[in-house]
Image: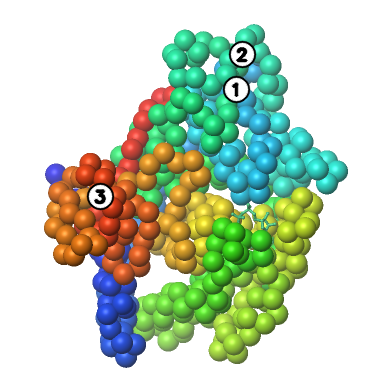
């Protein structure tokens, strides 16, 4: 069997961008005009090719998503909670909002792998500001019927098979797990692996996105707010989301990026779309809408001005970023506002952000669960800094599809089938990473590798 059609299509799309990144570092701006014209035209033809079976592709992803949602729902609402096997997680890991949500997501992964109902006291989540029931104001409860953490007997996490007979298992935070479970991220459930790898360019991110989709089902209150907010703001498609994370993050966990760096990719997205409408003989060009989410009000007040003058229309609300002041992050208002930004970023057709931020990674995760678009969403982003990661992940690898012999001292050689680590996308056609076997670290061409996806059986999916 050769490469599946879906994989090939995704790979060509990605490689068109790899050529672009490669040439950008070699050519002057004027010559890049030619390359971009060519690239937009190639993307148009690729859309024509993929449009052919998109309905089937999206349907398969949607079926998978429904399957995962159903299984989580079933696991979380056992008919006999008194005797159900339970996994207990403490939600109050002392870290930011995104980190806590990812912590809970990782507990959900364990619950699904072990087929245990996840018990987590969301009641006292973030109540340090004195506000009651913050979780339920924003989200639906993670279980309707089973919240009692007690049982006939209990144990701490361990991978000894005998521990499976205990009714209650306490599960630690990801940073302190020993022994390491075989299902830790970036592992995906074996039962859905084949169709998922076929249809999604980012199977793990799709999977964790679906866990988040369940966890973050908006409460009625939040749902209503979102509907009104979207209507008042005239949030419509196509729209590109940008997440500009500044304040306490700069100089500690991330570098400063100017608004121009973000807008370069927004512009590229709309140029691509404009060419498409020309090719389709549609005279109407899309309005250039941008959903702006940021913790820095000055982006609204000053930085976007030149782009507004050029016709870009920014959606969102400066009030959301004003409540993002680091000194009031425990307050409900701040939490509410970042959730609104997060959910709307995830509804955009493309996002430009920094993957060093959990907010941006969550938005991208949730984005993968939308199957109404014309293609899978695994390439609908640009990260100005890190590549995607899940905090506490065991290994992120790439698998070579063809061999490579190093062209300089900075490159590494490998054979087809070898596994390579990935540390960085250099955005010049190369990754930096190390060879799993030789341990040599260096550059390797991105087009010669593909995502290395590991899968293990998840008991809740039997
Ligand atoms: P990270 O620090 O970006 O990795 O993510 P955290 O969830 O740990 O912390 C982010 C905090 O910054 C959030 O709880 C918000 O208070 C604030 N924040 C960051 N980005 C945004 C944004 O786009 N909008 C709003 N309203 N707040 C944000």
The answer to whether 410 appears left or right of 285 in the picture is left
The answer to which of 397 and 251 lies nearer the viewer is 251
Q: Secondary structure at mark 2?
A: strand
Q: Is residue 427 visible?
A: yes
Residue 213: mark: none
Dots 1, 2 in contact, CB < 8 A: yes
Q: Residue at x 69, y 37 (%)?
A: 92
Q: Return the residue at label 3.
A: 440
Q: Earlier in the sequence, mark 1 or mark 2?
A: 2
Q: Residue at x 50, y 13 (%)?
A: 163
Q: Earlier in the sequence, mark 2 or mark 3?
A: 2
Q: Quadrant of residue 217?
A: top right
Q: Secondary structure at mark 3?
A: loop
Residue 170: mark: 1
Q: Return the residue at label 2.
A: 154
The answer to which of 294 and 374 lies nearer the viewer is 294
Q: Quadrant of residue 128?
A: top right
Q: How is the image coloured?
A: rainbow
């Amino acid at each position: 069997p050769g490469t599946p059609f879906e994989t090939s299509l995704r790979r060509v799309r990605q490689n068109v961008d790899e050529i672009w990144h490669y040439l950008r570092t070699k050519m002057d701006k004027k010559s890049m005009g030619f390359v971009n014209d060519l690239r937009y035209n190639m993307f148009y033809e690729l859309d024509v090719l993929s449009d052919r079976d998109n309905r089937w592709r999206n349907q398969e992803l949607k079926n998978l998503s429904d399957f995962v949602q159903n299984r989580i729902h079933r696991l979380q609402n056992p008919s006999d909670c008194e005797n159900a096997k339970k996994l207990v997680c403490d939600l109050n890991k002392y870290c930011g909002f995104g980190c806590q949500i990812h912590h809970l997501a990782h507990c959900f992964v364990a619950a699904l792998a072990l087929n245990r109902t996840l018990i987590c006291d969301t009641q006292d989540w973030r109540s340090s500001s004195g506000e009651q029931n913050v979780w339920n104001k924003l989200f639906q409860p993670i279980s309707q019927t089973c919240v009692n953490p007690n049982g006939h007997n209990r144990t701490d996490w361990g991978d000894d098979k005998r521990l499976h007979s205990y009714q209650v298992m306490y599960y630690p935070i990801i940073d302190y797990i020993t022994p390491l479970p075989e299902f830790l991220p970036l592992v995906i459930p074996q039962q859905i692996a084949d169709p998922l790898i076929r249809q999604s360019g980012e199977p793990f991110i799709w999977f964790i996105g679906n866990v988040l989709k369940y966890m973050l089902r908006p409460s009625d209150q939040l749902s209503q707010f979102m509907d009104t907010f979207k209507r008042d703001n005239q949030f419509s498609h196509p729209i590109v989301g940008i997440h500009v994370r500044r304040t306490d993050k700069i100089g500690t966990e991330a570098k400063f990026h100017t608004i121009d760096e973000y807008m370069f990719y927004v512009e590229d997205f709309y140029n691509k779309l404009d060419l498409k409408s020309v090719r389709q003989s549609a005279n109407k060009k899309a309005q250039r809408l941008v959903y702006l989410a940021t913790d820095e009000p000055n982006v609204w007040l000053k930085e976007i001005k030149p782009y507004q003058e050029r016709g870009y229309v920014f959606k969102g609300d400066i009030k959301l970023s004003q409540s993002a002041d680091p000194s009031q992050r425990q307050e409900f208002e701040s939490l509410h506002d970042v959730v609104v930004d997060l959910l709307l970023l995830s509804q955009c057709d493309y996002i430009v952000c920094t993957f060093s931020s959990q907010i941006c990674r969550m938005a991208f995760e949730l984005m993968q669960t939308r199957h109404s678009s014309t293609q899978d969403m695994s390439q609908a982003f640009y990260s100005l800094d890190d590549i995607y990661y899940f905090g506490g992940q065991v290994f992120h690898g790439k698998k070579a599809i063809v061999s490579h012999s190093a062209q300089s001292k900075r490159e590494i050689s490998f054979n087809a089938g070898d596994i390579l680590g990935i540390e960085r996308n250099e955005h010049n056609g190369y990754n930096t990473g190390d060879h799993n076997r030789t341990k040599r670290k260096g550059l390797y061409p991105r087009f010669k590798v593909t995502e290395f996806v590991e899968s293990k059986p998840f008991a809740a999916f039997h």
